[in-house]
Amino acid sequence: FIVTDIETCPFGDVPNHWAYEAVKYVYANSLMQGTDEATFAPDENMTRAMLVTVLYRMANPEEKANNYNFADVPEGQWYSDAVAWAAENDIVSGVSENKFAPNEDITREQLALIIYRFAKMQDYDVTIKADISSFADTADISDWALDAMKWANKTELVNGTSETTLSPKATATRAQV
């Protein structure tokens, strides 16, 4: 990607938000769009479809995936190609054998796992891990997400929601992503 510097951001709801610079970045690099022309909605929940679409745009695959295995992901939706690509590349699996749940909010531990798998696919080093034992809610992290949460915390992709909590079961917001 070529990082584009933009002077302003077209979204009126982000100038005083803590994620303003990140919103400018994802918008300038066509990774995320607003919820409409004037609104980014940084504190709204991120869905599973939104996240895989961001990663799909980052990867910019040359070929479309043609594997639409999820009953709730029909062809032709704004997220269909992204979900098919992410499933084909083992970045995501469904919430069941044939259900992806594209409109479900994504939890912070799901976010960590999906980004972890994406990083692995991109040949990034995912072996580094943080000691997260100081967070009071470490026991709340699902076993399937533990390594991903440790990696994501070490790389500062997923920080604590406070000095003592990671909030793995909480929904990730658009600003956090």
Image (cartoon, helix red, strand yellow):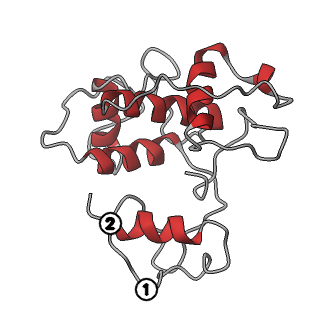
- Residue linked to disc 2: 3
Mark 2 residue crowding within 10 angstroms, few (<14) / some (14–19) / many (20+): few
Taking the view exactly as shown, the residue that stands out farthest to the left is: 63
Q: Is residue 96 left or right of residue 66?
A: right
Residue displayed at 30% across by 33% down: 122
Horizontal and vertical percent for residue 151? Answer: 56, 29
Horizontal and vertical percent for residue 143? Answer: 65, 14
Where, by quadrant of the figure, is residue 20 drawn?
Answer: bottom right
Local secondary structure at mark 2: loop
Horizontal and vertical percent for residue 79? Answer: 36, 46
Mark 1 residue crowding within 10 angstroms, few (<14) / some (14–19) / many (20+): few
Q: Amino acid at mark 2?
A: Val
Q: Is residue 153 visible?
A: yes
Horizontal and vertical percent for residue 147? Answer: 58, 20
- Residue linked to disc 1: 7
Residue displayed at 47% across by 30% down: 116
Q: Amino acid at mark 1?
A: Glu
Relative to 62, say whether 97 is above or below. above
Q: Nearer the viewer, residue 11 or 80?
A: 11
The quadrant of the image that shows the N terminus is bottom left
Q: Is residue 107 visible?
A: no
Residue displayed at 37% across by 35% down: 73
